[in-house]
């Protein structure tokens, strides 16, 4: 079977694809209500994003994998690579994204003292400096894509990177990922991406991010 990304064996990606039965990918349930992230992300956006956009990637991935399994030649399998990458990346990225968010009532937006805060201060100077740089780099994405805080296995540092479209992050271990596709914010923030990026820090699940960092640095 086509390998979605070399990082699938890592814990964060394993959780991202945990909702499986046989070879069928399914839409993961959110660990909070659609309106739980308001006023920072509207319930309408969350419901559409989850049930329409993410579901479309799941459907597309299942269809592409089925076609790949039935392919009669290598040529046919090669033709399916882009569909597998796009829909597989969309499924992985969104599964990680939902876990990256948490209502303020459940600790969203709160970064306690610990290994993540220490690493951010070491690699960016301060938490505020990290957020400012992340927002600047991510807002500069042309068209659709993702902004990531990733852990670099080689440098042993946290770094800010972006990926285009639904490309999964394979150069780093994903710690925090933010969807910058218009479907993630346009209904609420229109074309003002910086407002969306400023607001999302109020509902970032730093506990999950710290867990991913701990797993990456074992």
Image (cartoon, rainbow, N blue to C red):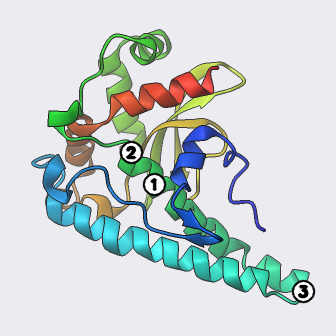
- Image quadrant in which the C terminus is located: top right
Check whether the beta carbons of the residues at disc 3 and disc 1 lie within 8 A of each other: no
Query: Which label is found at residue 65?
Result: none
Query: Which label is found at residue 73?
Result: 3
Residue at x 49% of width, y 72% of height: 57
Q: Compared with residue 108, is residue 42 higher up or lower down, i.e. above or below?
A: below
Residue nearest the viewer, comparing 26 with 121: 26
- Image quadrant in which the N terminus is located: bottom right
Check whether the beta carbons of the residues at disc 2 and disc 1 lie within 8 A of each other: yes
Q: Which of marks 3 and 1 is in front?
A: 1
Q: Which residue lies furthest to the front in this view?
A: 21
Residue that numbered label 2 is attached to: 99
Residue that numbered label 1 is attached to: 95
Disc 1 element: helix
Question: How far apart in space, not on screen, are marks 2 and 3 (Cα)?
Answer: 38 Å
Q: Compared with residue 173, is residue 185 higher up or lower down, i.e. above or below?
A: below
Q: Quick check: 21 left or right of 43?
A: right
Q: Where is residue 38 in the image (x, y as percent from the top left)?
A: 12, 49
Residue nearest the viewer, comparing 21 with 71: 21
Q: Position of residue 9 (x, y in %)?
A: 69, 45
Residue at x 69% of width, y 26% of height: 153
Q: Which is nearer the N-term, disc 3 or disc 1?
A: 3
Question: How far apart in space, not on screen, are marks 3 and 1 (Cα)?
Answer: 32 Å
Q: Quick check: 198 left or right of 146?
A: left
Disc 2 element: helix
């Amino acid at each position: 079977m086509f390998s979605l990304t070399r990082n699938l064996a890592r814990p964060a990606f394993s959780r991202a694809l945990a909702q499986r039965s046989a070879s069928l990918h399914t839409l993961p349930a959110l660990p909070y209500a659609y309106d739980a992230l308001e006023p920072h992300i509207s319930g309408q956006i969350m419901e559409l994003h989850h049930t329409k956009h993410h579901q479309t990637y799941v459907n597309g991935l299942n269809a592409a994998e089925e076609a790949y399994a039935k392919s009669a030649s290598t040529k046919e399998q090669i033709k399916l690579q882009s569909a597998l990458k796009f829909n597989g990346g969309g499924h992985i990225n969104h599964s990680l994204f939902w876990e990256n968010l948490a209502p303020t009532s459940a600790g969203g937006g709160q970064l306690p003292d610990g290994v993540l805060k220490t690493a951010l201060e070491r690699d960016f100077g301060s938490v505020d400096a990290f957020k400012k740089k992340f927002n600047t780099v991510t807002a500069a994405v042309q068209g659709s894509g993702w902004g990531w805080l990733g852990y670099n296995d080689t440098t042993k540092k946290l770094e800010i990177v972006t990926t285009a479209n639904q490309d999964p992050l394979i150069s780093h271990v994903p710690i925090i990922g933010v969807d910058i596709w218009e479907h993630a914010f346009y209904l609420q923030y229109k074309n003002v991406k910086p407002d969306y990026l400023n607001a999302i820090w109020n509902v970032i699940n730093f506990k999950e991010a710290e867990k991913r960092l701990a797993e990456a640095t074992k």
